[in-house]
Amino acid sequence: MTEVISVKFRNKGKVYFFDPNGLTVAKGANVIVETAKGLEFAECATGNHQVDDETVHPPLRPVVRIATAEDVKRAEENRRREKDAAEVCRQRIAKHGLDMKLVDVEYNFEGSKILFFFTSEGRVDFRELVKELAGIFKTRIELRQIGVRDEARMLGGLGICGRPFCCAQFLDDFQPVSIKMAKTQGLSLNPAKISGSCGRLMCCLKYEQDAYEELVQSVPKVDAFVETPAGVGTVVDVNLLKGTVRVRLEEPSDTAMKTFEAAEVTVLGGKAKRAEYLAARAEGAIETPPVRLTQTRARRPSAERVENREKAEQERTAPEADAARIQPAEAAEGEKKASAQPKNCGGRPRQAQGRKPAAPQPRPRTAEQNRQADQRRNDGPSGGDEQRRSQNNARRKRYRYSGPRRNPDGGQSGEGNKGE
C-alpha cells in the first residue's frame, strides 16, 4: 500500500496521485506540485489515503508545499493574463484566416509557457501564428488540438438531465460509447436524443451499461412466451428499472395487456413455443379458458341527458296526437288523395315526381304467335324479299372495309380491304 493524495487541475475531472511528501493535506486545499512541465497550482480532491501499489504509475511525483497567499495571488494573476492572451489569439486567427476554434488558454504556474487549446475538423498549418504569438508574448508558445469531448470538459455546462457534465465532474477518461448500449437500456435510437452537447453519444450510456446488463438477466425478453397468474401470453414491453413486464394474454376474450412483476412471470419459450401452444389448443389438446365477461358499472344518466330524451319522445309522439284531432271529412279526403297516388308494389322504388315515365315493356309472345313465326321462317321469304336481300348483300360487299390486318406478334401490316 502507498500513501498518496489525489489532486485535480483546473476544469478537468481527472485526478492524479501525488506523494504527500510527509505533509497532511486536507480535501479542498490548494497545493503546489511538481510535474513534468514544472511547478503547477492544483486543488486537493482527496486527502491522505492508502491505495494499492498496482494503481500507482511511477514515477510518483511529490507535493512541493501547501499553497501560500502569494501562490494564490500569482495563480489569480495568471487567470487574468489568460483572458488577454485568448483575445489576442482570436484576433490573429481571424487575421490569418485559419479554420480553428480557440477553446482555452493556460499559463503555467511559473509563467514561462502559454498553452492554447483549439478544435478543428482537419489539420491546420499554424506555424506563422505561433511565430507571431511568440513575438507578442515573449515566451514559449504551444498550440494543442483537442476533440469535441475535451472541449465540453474544459468549458463545462449542463446536460439534458439538468446536472453538470459528467466529464467535467468525475469522469477520468473517455470510454467508447455505441448505439447498442442505448438499445440495451431501452432508450430511443434517435442520435439527436441520446447525444450530449458535444455532439457525441452521452458518456452516461457507458458507465450505466454494467447495471443495465445485470438487470436484463432478471427479466424476460420481448416476444418471449411466458406464463402469468392470469394465463399464458407474449411479452410486449419490459421496464428494466421498475422490474415489470407487459404481457398480451392469449385468452380470446381478453385483448387488453396486463402488467406483472418480473418474479411472477415464468418463461416458457419464444415464438416457436407460442406456435406450438396455439396449434395444440386448435386441435383440442389444451382446454380453451372460459370466456370472461367484462362487468361494467351502469352509468347514471345526467339531468341534461334525461331532459333531451324526454324532448325527443315528445317530438316523436306529436304527429300521432295531431292526426287524432283531424276531422272525419278531412281524413276521408286525405285517404282519397292517398289512394289516387301510385302504390309501391313489387319492391320497386316509387317513381319520383317530375320524371319522364319509363317506356312500356313489350308483352311476351303467346304460344300461337311463336308457332306462326316458326311457320313463316320455314316457308322461306317471298320473291320481293329475296330480291331485296340480294341488293343489300351487293351493297355491303361494295362498301365493305375490314381495316388493317394485325400480325400475330401484335403489329399491323397492310392497309386492309377497302372494297372490290
Image (cartoon, rainbow, N blue to C red):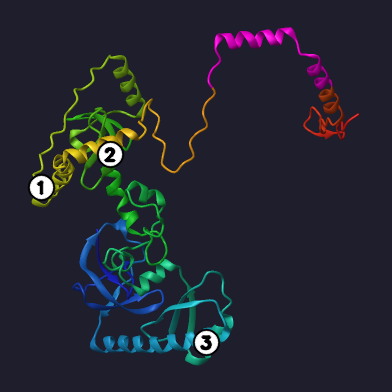
* Residue in front for this viewpoint, 55 or 194: 194
Give the percent coordinates (x, y) of residue 239: 25, 45
- 104 vs 6: above or below: below
- Residue at point 47% right, 89% down? 88
Total residue callouts: 3
- Residue 92 tag number: 3
Q: What element carries label 2?
A: loop
Residue beneath the point at 58% across and 9% down: 368
Q: Which amino acid does label 2 sit on?
A: Gln
Secondary structure at numbered mark 3: helix
Amino acid on which the number 3 mark rests in the picture: Arg
Q: In which quarter of the image is residue 113?
A: bottom left
Q: Which of marks 2 and 1 is nearer the N terminus?
A: 2
Residue drawn at x 84%, y 20% as measured from the top left: 390
Image point (48%, 74%), residue name: 144
Q: Which residue in the protein does label 1 denote? A: 306
Please state the horizontal and vertical placement of residue 177, each as a whole percent of the image.
40, 55
Q: Is residue 362 magenta?
A: no
Q: Which mark is residue 217?
A: 2
Query: Which range of residues does the magenta coloring cover?
Result: 363-390
Where in the figure is residue 308, as x and y percent of width and height?
14, 49
Q: Tell whether 302 sits left or right of 56.
A: left
Find the residue positioned furthest to the front.
329
Look at the numbered discs 3 and 1 and tell me whether their residues touch, using CB distance below 8 Å.
Answer: no
Q: Which amino acid does label 1 sit on?
A: Val
Q: Which of labels 3 and 1 is toward the front?
A: 1
**Mark toward the start of the polypeptide (2 vs 3):** 3
